[in-house]
Amino acid sequence: MRPTIVECMREHAQARPDAIAFRFLNDLASAPQELNYHQLWQEAGVVANFLGTVASPGSRIMLFYPPGLEYIKAFYGCMLAGMVAVPLYPPRRNSKSDRLTKVARSCQSVLALTTESELAAVQAAWNEQAEPGMALAFHVTDTLDVTDARPFVPPAIDPAVPAFLQYTSGSTGAPKGVIITHANIMANMRHLSLMSGGHAGDVFVNWLPLFHDLGLVTAVLWPVSLGASSTLMAPATFVRDPLLWLQAITRYRGSMCGAPNFAYALCVDKIADASLTKLDLSSWRVAYNAAEPVRAATLDAFGTRFGACGFRPQTFYPSYGMAEATVFISGGNASAAPISLVVDRQELAARRVTPVDVGDALATRIVACGAASAPHDLRVVDPESRRELADGQVGEIWFAGPSVSPGYWGLGAQTAEAFGQSICNSDLPAAYLRTGDLGVMVDGELYVTGRIKDLVILNGRNYYPQDIELSATAAHRAIRPGHVAAFAVEEDLVERLVVVAEVEREHFRSLDVDHVVAAVRQQVLRDHEINADRIVLVKPYKVPVTSSGKIQRRQARAMLLDGTLEVLASSATAAPHCAAPATATEHMLAPIWCRVLGRAQIGTDENFFDLGGDSLAAAEIAAALGRHRSTELDIGQFFDTPTITGLAGWLDLVDAHSTRKSQLMAVPAAAVVRV
């Protein structure tokens, strides 16, 4: 491989100019948008030429793009120009998050790129969040002249300089920018390809968010490092109809395709039996499962369901990684079925691995995530003594090698805490990354068993419980400050968010459970764009804490699950509302909401998010509506009209507008009076 991804792109543009680099699918019915390697080089060069007129090498360029090829051109354009890309998702309308300005302040960016369609929304979000004196220039790239004949001469790129910043959440709500150098990229590409057998003939088919480390590396960077092709679709497209992902793999003979665990579970749950006969998954060689805990039950269910479609057990490739290591740390044998261990779950929670029989009441299966390739090094270390642990002992996962980031942008203290660590009583260099994850090595295989810092992982995204707890505390005066615990529990193979909150004693008699639960749920949703599936209210001193007053989230979780937590009230005990549908559109919507949200009955005035709705459920409802009517529903509409009555009213207004427009268009020209 070449020393930088830019040189890989140039090599493929010269040697294989007509080979498809990227293909984007809006759906399978319409023609895809495509970029061959020559076009990728040329159009990324147009962006680079433009950037050269408005910024200097090393500048941090914030990218706000919807899923699609324009993002890819801009991302590679930044690197061609010697600038540092900062991939971010376009802010949602009505979002109260100040993440945009926090990132801009962190990376000291003064320039952002976007598309013409996103410009107004991104500028509006900036204007709402920006503090006095903050300035950010916005430029649109999809209107640049791609036929610009000016020759592009890329600058010499030092592999040691940053290529992009991958922003993650910070433990106090302040985002951290992981520095990924050009050398990090190529080291991780070699690591990935060596472990999985990736080659130029592979066909990548993915729907992952391209601003997120897993999607960015495996769908945008890895294919170009190989000279392979990458077929993409928007995350919302997959969520609306998971079948489309598998159909795309079938059509384009996808071989290298992956996602977090929840996506495989969604395929099992949402794809009808009648659709299986039209799928051919025999070309799928590596199905990586990463970004959240790998569930053995999900692997079994997916393999059983889609085995008749040509999916093979050895196709599954459980993996482990994180942004601080570019993305990929370890993976298994790409030609063998996944390995798992059956252990005692209570012992595992106590950081001990005790094998038990499958039928044991406390049995749980953990899945191996393989090993690392040289020159990378993977160790399990006691987080307190910093001594390496023997096989079979649970400790913190430490990782070293050329894929490891230099650290966090502008955060020296946090970089020193996580990077460049040394193992006590060892001659190994001080070059290890502390992952914060717990794991155990057994027979040369890494098993990831948990988190040291109680990180909440939902749908492949990481959330710090402290941030969620602060939001819950701010939601209502009845919540006792400093006595809230947020954690995830597994239900039906899916991780779900639970918030346990103490109620101030003076609010007991007048406690309006519905109001408090709704306030907490809305505050968490507004601040973090996730839904709290269950909100539990307890009396003072019932949330377990340490002697120093720190919240014991794991103990709170265990008490809730085993029934020893004294519950005052919860979202499950809130009084239901059952206002009946009154209009034809409300009657049409009600059964769809009930089916998607798993309710026997839903009142037309009940809030979608109070009922457990989230972006996945919104996308499923939107897809169902698409089969009933021509109006296309953006899932953002649920934030504006989160009740059946509100959504029905909006749909009726859209229909009335469309009807009126059709009537006007049908008026004969002679009948139109012009003044």
Image (spheres, rainbow, N blue to C red):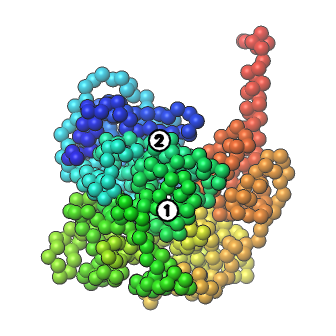
- Tell me: residue 313, above or below residue 517: above
In the image, what residue type sits under mark 2?
Tyr
Quadrant position of residue 341? bottom left
Indicate left or right for 28 with 591 as reference. left
Indicate left or right for 535 with 82 as reference. right
Say which label, 1 or 2, has the lower sequence index.
2
Front-most of residues 498 and 173: 498
Q: Which residue matches tag 2? A: 252
Q: Residue 97 placed where, x, y %? A: 51, 56
Secondary structure under tag 1 reads helix
Q: Residue 276 placed where, x, y %? A: 60, 51
Is residue 207 in view from this perspective? Answer: no
Quadrant position of residue 529? bottom right
- Tell me: residue 502, above or below residue 168: below
- Marks 1/2: CA–CA distance: 23 Å
Foreground: disc 1 or disc 2: 2
Residue 261 badge: 1
Front-most of residues 196 and 510: 196
Residue 543 badge: none
- Tell me: residue 505, above or below residue 287: below
> Please, which residue is most extreme toward the top here?
670
Q: Residue 449 placed where, x, y %? A: 42, 75
> Please, which residue is most extreme toward the left here?
427
